[in-house]
Image (cartoon, rainbow, N blue to C red):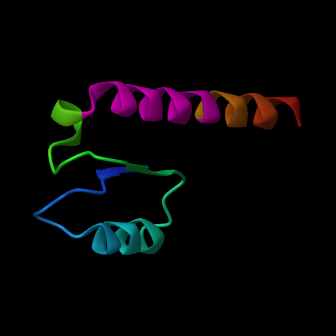
Amino acid sequence: MHVFGDQDLNIPAAVLRAGAVRAASRGTYEIAGASHAVPVSQPDAVVAAIADAGKAYVESREADTAA
């Protein structure tokens, strides 16, 4: 999972997007208006991204055990 801000002045968003693709990220969350310190500038968005990832993991495990 990759979570990053589109207003990061240290690492351009295009570089972060490319890194997510290269790492075969299972989820990429580009947070509008967030800075380099995404958990500080947009904590609710980061919590939501983590919750989404957790739900997706649980669903994938349930699907594996049902098969």
Side of 41 where 67 appears, left or right: right
Q: Residue furthest right?
A: 67
Whether 13 is drawn above or below 42: the answer is below
| Residue visible at 35% across and 70% down in the picture | 19
| Residue visible at 71% across and 30% down in the picture | 59
Q: Quadrant of the C terminus?
A: top right
The spot of residue 8 in percent (x, y) is 19, 58
Query: Depth check: 40 or 65 in front?
Result: 40
Query: Depth check: 39 or 33 in front?
Result: 33
| Residue visible at 43% across and 32% down in the picture | 50
The majority secondary structure of the magenta stretch comes to helix
Q: How many marks?
A: 0
- Which image quadrant is residue 40 in? top left
Query: Depth check: 14 or 27 in front?
Result: 14
The spot of residue 33 in percent (x, y) is 29, 46
Side of 61 where 15 appears, left or right: left
Whether 25 is drawn above or below 54: the answer is below
- Which image quadrant is residue 66 in? top right
The spot of residue 25 in percent (x, y) is 48, 59
Side of 23 where 13 appears, left or right: left
Residue 12 lies in magenta, yes or no? no
- Which image quadrant is residue 58 in? top right
Q: Residue furthest left?
A: 10
Whether 6 is drawn above or below 50: the answer is below
| Residue visible at 63% across and 35% down in the picture | 56
The part of the chain drawn in magenta is 42-56
